[in-house]
Image (cartoon, rainbow, N blue to C red):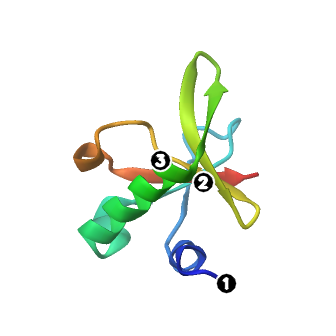
């Protein structure tokens, strides 16, 4: 298992209960444990993901371990969550 997969496996993913019809989870920057590591992971997702449409917007999705990961596209220093859903 690679280092990134271990990071993801060891995070506290919260169910996004405000969007039950679009089931997904999120991990918060404030709970990640290391600001620079959070930003490195966000940048990795953006650099290695694929652009896909979700309704009228496009997001960068990174697929790994049966999950897809994405952010909402804010500037790196403003990104507060990493989302994930079953792939």
Q: In the shown orientation, is residue 57 left or right of residue 72?
A: right
Q: Residue at x 36, y 63 (%)?
A: 40
Q: In the shown orientation, is residue 13 left or right of residue 81?
A: right
Q: Residue at x 68, y 45 (%)?
A: 23
Which label was assigned to residue 84?
2
Query: In this picture, is 64 found above or below 7?
Result: above
Residue at numbered disc 3: 46
Q: Secondary structure at mark 1?
A: loop
Residue 73 lies in quadrant: top left
Q: Secondary structure at mark 2?
A: strand
Picture coordinates of residue 13, whole percent (x, y): 54, 65
Q: In the shown orientation, is residue 16 left or right of residue 23?
A: left
Residue 64 lies in quadrant: bottom right
Query: Alpha carbon of mark 3 to alpha carbon of mark 1: how far?
Result: 21 Å
Which one is in front, 16 or 74?
74
Is tag 3's residue or tag 1's residue first in the polypeptide sequence?
Answer: 1
Which one is in front, 9 or 5?
5
Query: In this picture, is 62 found above or below 19?
Result: below
Q: Residue at x 68, y 38 (%)?
A: 22
Residue at numbered disc 1: 1
Which one is in front, 75 or 10?
75
Disc 1 packing (10 Å; few <14; some 14–19; many ≥20): few
Query: Alpha carbon of mark 2 to alpha carbon of mark 3: how far?
Result: 14 Å
Is tag 2's residue or tag 1's residue first in the polypeptide sequence?
Answer: 1
Q: Residue at x 53, y 73 (%)?
A: 4
């Amino acid at each position: 298992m690679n280092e990134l997969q271990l990071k993801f496996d060891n995070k506290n993913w919260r169910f996004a209960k405000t969007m039950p019809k679009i089931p997904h989870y999120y991990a918060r920057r404030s709970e990640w444990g290391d600001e620079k590591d959070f930003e490195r992971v966000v940048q990795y997702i953006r650099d290695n993901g694929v652009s896909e449409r979700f309704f009228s917007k496009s997001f960068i999705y990174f697929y790994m371990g049966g999950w897809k990961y994405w952010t909402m596209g804010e500037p790196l220093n403003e990104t507060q969550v990493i989302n994930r859903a079953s792939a």
